């Protein structure tokens, strides 16, 4: 069984770098509207909170699993999450630390954008960001998101209601399985505050993400505010903007008056430029319509909203796609670069890296990252206890990973090799390269099982053999 950290969190992290006006909010569905506890015809017992119930085809309770612990908190800059399990000890810290359930234990987890708080998420119908995953003893894995739902699930829904004032979260779900049975539960847990984020961007009918970080650059021209970038990805430095989805805005200072302004008029008068860059497809969108409101609260603190907006992609193929966004917060200097430490962090140990040798063969490439200085041959590299990245020869200087080079991609170190059979996620990122310098990184290293921790970044001398 995968460690609990990867039940929901990894499913969200897989799209860390990726909203059409939102429909008028409906009244939140009241928990239990369709299956009010105690009213299920034919059940053998009165349904109670903190129990996972299994119902047969006739609606009779066939099995029960007691929920012994549950927790709710914000994960990943804007997602409310909820975990319930048949074991003791589920806390935010335990989840973040990669809590591993024992054989026979059961876990159900869900995460939603805060716009779904208190609303029913109907599996197979909802297109915006949500994740539901269950590892229940005796059943196949049950997963659902906006893009995919397990074949075992024929229908289902869940509601996660978080009360930030009362510090309480209520989570309930009901799944209809393809064998005709039903799994359901309702659980109440303490909500652990921290990390809440109301910032978001919406494009079209199936894209909604939280905006997590903002950067500022020099003003576009005299009389303008600093150019602002609001990013979806969990990045710390402006140099990483091209690797995530973001909104860019350049506005004349006289637009920062807290009043609504018609976007086409502002653009026509040369007072505004707004764009949206999507890393999914590497497409730039121009925001061409809608209402813009900008409040400037301090030197680099802004509240920005775009409503009833529309955007057109750079090819003109998707014209007037609905667009909305909201941001409130400060911004970082885009020119501050991230400090780079050439090192490998492996199971609590830090090893400095000082040489790189890349061997490119007919089919495969091998990247040797070595702890010693002056390594320039493959033989010397192999003798230096290197970390070795193996991948397709044609992709040595590309950003690849487990999903894009699955058959050949592997990481080797300290007598271990991790590949498609043992890796859950892993990415190899090439930041920069010249004839004698190389900057690369290993990120999102996660195993299907086990607690090996590995993180690497290298920037330094390079020798290429066989190019």
Image: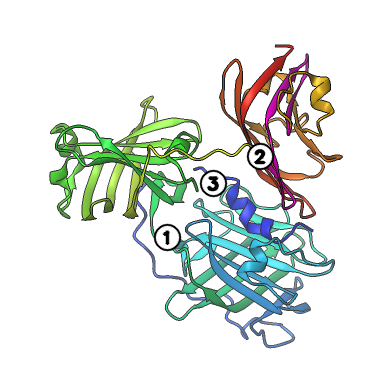
Do tag 1 and tag 2 residues touch (Cβ < 8 Å)? no
- The colour scheme of the drawn protein is rainbow
Q: How far across and how far down the image is residue 9, in percent?
A: 62, 56
Q: Give coordinates of residue 451: x percent, y percent.
A: 76, 55
Residue on which the image places disc 3: 16
| Side of 289 relative to 453 (left or right) | left
- Mark before the other along the chain sequence, 3 or 1: 3
Q: Which residues are drawn in magenta?
A: 344-371
The picture places residue 85, in percent across and down from the top left corner, at 71, 72
Mark on residue 197?
Answer: 1
Question: Which residue reaches farthest right?
Answer: 415
Position of the C terminus by quadrant: top right
- Residue at x-position 66% and y-position 65%: 95
Q: Are marks 2 and 3 in contact (CB under 8 Å)?
A: no
Q: Decide whether residue 345 is among the magenta residues.
A: yes
Label 3: few (<14), some or many (≥20) within 10 Å? Answer: some
The residues bearing labels 2 and 3 have C-alpha atoms spaced at a distance of: 24 Å
Residue topped by disc 2 = 343
Disc 1 element:
loop
**Residue name at image x 46 percent, y 67 percent:** 117
Closer to the N terminus: mark 1 or mark 2? 1
Mark 2 Cα-neighbour bin, 10 Å: few <14, some 14–19, many ≥20: many
- Examine the residues drawn in magenta and state their main secondary structure: strand
């Amino acid at each position: 069984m995968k460690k609990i950290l990867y039940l929901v969190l990894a499913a969200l992290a897989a799209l860390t770098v990726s909203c059409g006006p939102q429909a008028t909010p409906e009244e939140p569905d009241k928990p239990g509207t369709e299956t009010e506890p105690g009213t299920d015809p034919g059940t053998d017992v009165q349904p109670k909170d903190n129990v996972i119930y299994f119902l047969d085809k006739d609606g009779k309770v066939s099995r029960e699993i007691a929920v012994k612990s549950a927790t709710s908190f914000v994960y990943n800059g804007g997602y409310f999450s909820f975990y319930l399990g048949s074991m003791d000890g589920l806390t935010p810290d335990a989840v973040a630390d990669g809590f591993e359930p024992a054989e026979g234990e059961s876990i159900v987890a869900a995460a939603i954008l805060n716009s779904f708080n208190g609303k029913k998420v109907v599996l197979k119908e909802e297109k915006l960001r949500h994740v539901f995953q269950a590892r229940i003893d005796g059943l196949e894995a049950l997963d659902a998101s906006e893009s995919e739902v397990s074949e075992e699930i024929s229908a289902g829904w869940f509601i996660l209601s978080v009360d930030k004032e009362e510090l309480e979260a209520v989570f309930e779900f009901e799944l209809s399985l393809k064998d005709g049975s039903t799994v359901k539960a309702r659980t109440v847990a303490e909500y652990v505050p921290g990390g809440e984020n109301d910032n978001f961007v919406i494009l079209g009918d199936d894209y909604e993400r939280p905006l997590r970080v903002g950067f500022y650059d020099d003003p576009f021209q005299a009389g303008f505010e600093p150019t602002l970038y609001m990013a979806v990805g969990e990045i710390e430095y402006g140099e990483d903007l091209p690797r995530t989805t973001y909104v860019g805005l350049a506005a004349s200072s006289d637009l920062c008056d807290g009043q609504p302004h018609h976007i086409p008029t502002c653009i026509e008068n040369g007072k505004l430029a707004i764009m949206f860059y999507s890393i999914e497809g590497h497409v730039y969108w121009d925001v061409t319509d809608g209402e813009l409101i900008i409040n400037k609260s301090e030197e680099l603190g802004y509240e920005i909203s775009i409503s009833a907006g529309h955007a057109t992609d750079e090819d003109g193929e998707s014209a007037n796609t609905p667009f909305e966004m909201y941001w409130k917060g400060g911004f970082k200097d885009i020119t501050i670069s991230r400090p780079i430490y050439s090192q490998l962090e492996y199971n609590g140990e830090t090893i400095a890296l000082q040489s790189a040798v890349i061997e490119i063969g007919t089919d495969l490439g091998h990247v040797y990252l070595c702890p010693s200085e002056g390594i320039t041959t493959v033989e010397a590299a192999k003798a230096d206890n290197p970390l070795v990245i193996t991948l397709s020869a044609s992709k040595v200087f590309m950003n690849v990973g487990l999903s894009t080079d699955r058959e050949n991609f592997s990481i080797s170190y300290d007598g271990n090799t991790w590949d498609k059979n043992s890796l859950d996620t892993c990415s190899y990122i090439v930041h920069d390269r010249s004839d004698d310098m190389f900057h690369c990184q290993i990120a999102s290293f996660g195993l299907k099982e086990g607690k090996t921790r590995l993180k690497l970044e290298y920037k330094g001398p390079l020798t290429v053999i066989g190019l």
